[in-house]
Image: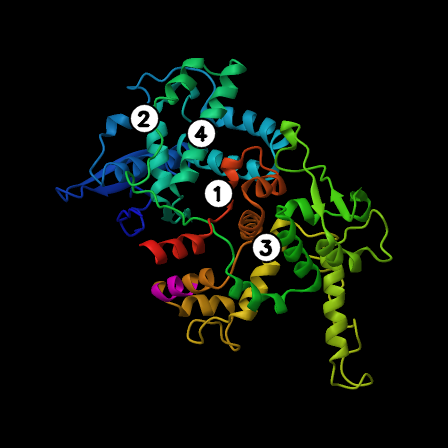
Amino acid sequence: MPTTKRRKARKPPAYRQRKGYTQAIVTLRDSATKRARDYWLGECGTPASRELYHRVIAAWEANDRRLPDPAEFDDRKNGAVNGPTVGAVIRAYWRWAKGYYHIKHSAAIKSALKLLRQHHGQTPAADFGPKKLRLLREAMITGFSGDQGSRRPWSRKYINAQVQRVRHMFKWASAREMVPVTVYQSLGALEPLRRGRTKARENQRVGPVPDELLGAVRPYLNRQVRALVELQLLTGARPAELLGLRPVDIDLDAGPGVWAHRPAEHKNAFREKERVIYLGPQAQKVLRPFLAARPLNAYLFSPAEADAERRSALHAERATPLPWGNRPGTNRRTAPKRKPGDRYTPTSYYRSIQYACEKAFPSPERLGKRSDETRAAWRARLTAEEQGELKAWRQAHSFHPYQLRHNAATNLRREFGLEAAQLALGHASAQITDAVYAERDRAKVIEIMRKIG
């Protein structure tokens, strides 16, 4: 896999007020000539001056920290025209998009629009062209760490997707005659980032959870989450397709010895495609304990139920006699900020797995949190190198729920072929199953090469 060297992230020059003036400035230094130059940004503290600050920094980073021409940021010289600003288009588009798209896609759109508004909120929308989009993309590549907050660099594939989302906003605006259609058309001239030809980081390919890791974590999962993990391994379902499962959602007469679940909401519901998850004998064995004496509309997998079981287990292990110490329930908060929900969400399901991974694989003693220190003190104690080491440790000893779908796809393909894996995972094309989810059985290749290689 080709690798590219990336400059270590450094804090950019500060946005500050010029002494004796009400104007904001930023001082940049040329990486080649070492000459410094002040860039005047406008009235200090205004949104326009902060936007211009981010644009100047992005242009400086994109040009390998060579000083950009100040005339590039003068809208009067660039012939800006009247009309709605980029910020006005963003507000109108977001009002429409947040109710139209799935919550996961909406979150990605919101992230792209936030960065666009930060750099070009006051820019006339008709003046936003490929050059500005390219500099915005450079800001996605480099990330940001300053007094106004931080943002880690995005990966190449995510950047390409975010650029497409920005383009789509201008397409939406042109269809409603908010901006000329030529704005959207011109943005298509910006080519996508190619692998090995950019400084943008590459994400590692997602693969199945190693069997030894899964086996070590299983004992630390609560009953509900362990059942969800088993169901994913048996069916290849996405987490969201199982988290809202209720008894009423299960068809017990789908076929001889088979149950079926048809989730109302799933990834391809907007394409009017039906998703059917078939539950065989092993999946039925996992589900039966949760179906017993449960109302038809109650969720099978409930964090509130898991929390009650946890407290009951702690009470059963209590060594202090009941007349002494706290009575059960007396030391709880009367109005807690957060309460366990009736059903798991993708985030709470993920966090439950991460907690189990941390219990199964505690951090090395020198990197872990000590019992006598606060979380803030723990973070302050670790150096940047130790924080990176701790992050690498956790990544190597944890997994994400979506990786379980890769496990199921790999096992189905190995045992029953590519078409069976495609049908079970609900893919429209076997190419997706083959390229993304099903890891090829390397044992066969190894055996062949051992004989003839």
Q: Indicate which label's residue lies in the foreground, 1 or 4.
A: 1
Q: Position of residue 414 (x, y in %)?
A: 53, 50
Q: Is residue 327 above or below residue 83?
A: below
The alpha-carbon separation of the residues under discs 4 and 2 comes to 15 Å
Q: Is residue 176 above or below residue 308?
A: above
- Residue drawn 55% across and 65% down? 357
Circle nearer the N terminus (2, 3)? 2
Secondary element at image label 2: helix
- Residue drawn 33% across and 22% down? 75
- Give the residue at mark 4: 164
- Give the residue at mark 2: 131
Q: Position of residue 22 (x, y in %)?
A: 34, 37
Contact between marks 4 and 3 (CB within 8 A): the answer is no
Q: Position of residue 337 (x, y in %)?
A: 68, 57
| Crowding near the residue tagged with mark 1, few <14, some 14–19, many ≥20 C-alpha atoms within 10 Å | some
Residue type at mark 3?
Tyr
Circle nearer the N terminus (1, 2)? 2
Circle nearer the N terminus (3, 1)? 3
- Residue drawn 44% across and 73% down? 364
The alpha-carbon separation of the residues under discs 4 and 3 comes to 28 Å
Q: Indicate which label's residue lies in the foreground, 4 or 2.
A: 4
Closer to us: 172 or 31: 172
- Give the residue at mark 3: 350
Majority secondary structure of magenta residues: helix
Q: Which mark is residue 436?
A: 1
Closer to us: 234 or 116: 234
Residue type at mark 2?
Lys
The alpha-carbon separation of the residues under discs 1 and 4 comes to 21 Å
Which residue range is magenta in the image? Answer: 385-390
